Image (cartoon, rainbow, N blue to C red):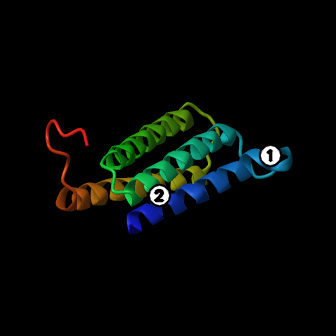
Amino acid sequence: HILAAVAVTFGAFSINASGGILLAPGGAHAAPGSRGWAWFGILNGLAYVVSGIGLWSLRLWAVSVAVVIAAATLATFAAYGLWVLFGNPFDPRTVAQLGVRFTVWTAIAASAHAWLARNVQPPARGDRG
């Protein structure tokens, strides 16, 4: 349940921080181009909460959601790298945030997979119950 708590807490913080960028008067906290990344943060934050609820409930699909989150974060990290490479504004906080998100979700996905593989038996073939 620790992984689930981390996932939900991380999701709540992501939604709060990203929402603060979008709702700041006049974009006070927003670096150029950061509004798009803020939307990414909100959508990911919602996925974090969904995955956390699934992990809390010991649902096998939650591991897949965690893997997809880690992969989407890595893809976004690469896209941000290209964004900067083509001369767009660079914010070191975004690099740090994407790095932390990728690391946390890779750890959650790997840990959840290992734990669930040891402790949860999938339903028997043909068992609809």
Earlier-in-chain disc, 2 versus 1: 1
- Do the numbered discs 2 and 1 sit on residues whose CB atoms are within 8 Å? no
**Does 42 sit left or right of 123 as displayed?**
right
Residue identifier under label 2: 100
Q: In this view, does 88 lie above or below 18?
A: above
Which residue is located at x 60 percent, y 33 percent? 87
Which residue is located at x 62 percent, y 35 percent? 88
**Does 34 sit left or right of 80 as displayed?**
right
Q: How far apart are marks 2 and 1 (CA)?
A: 24 Å
Residue 125 picture location, percent across and down: 14, 38
Residue 48 picture location, percent across and down: 49, 51
Residue identifier under label 1: 27
**Does 11 sit left or right of 104 as displayed?**
right
Q: What secondary structure is found at the residue carrying circle 1?
A: helix
Q: Residue reaching furthest front?
A: 129
Q: Nearer the viewer, residue 54 or 13?
A: 54
Q: Residue reaching furthest left?
A: 125
Is residue 103 in view?
Answer: no
Which residue is located at x 50 percent, y 45 percent? 47
**Which quarter shows the N terminus?**
bottom left
Which residue is located at x 56 percent, y 38 percent? 84
Q: Nearer the viewer, residue 72 or 96?
A: 72
Q: What secondary structure is found at the residue carrying circle 2?
A: helix
Is residue 35 in view?
Answer: yes
> Which amino acid type corresponds to the residue marked 2 in the rendered image?
Val
- How many numbered marks are there? 2
On residue 58, the disc is: none
Q: Which of 128 and 23 is in front in this view?
A: 128
**Does 103 sit left or right of 47 as displayed?**
left
> Which amino acid type corresponds to the residue marked 1 in the rendered image?
Gly
Residue 53 picture location, percent across and down: 45, 55
- For label 2, the crowd category at 10 Å Cα-Cα, with few meaning under 14, some 14 to 19 and many 20 or more, is few
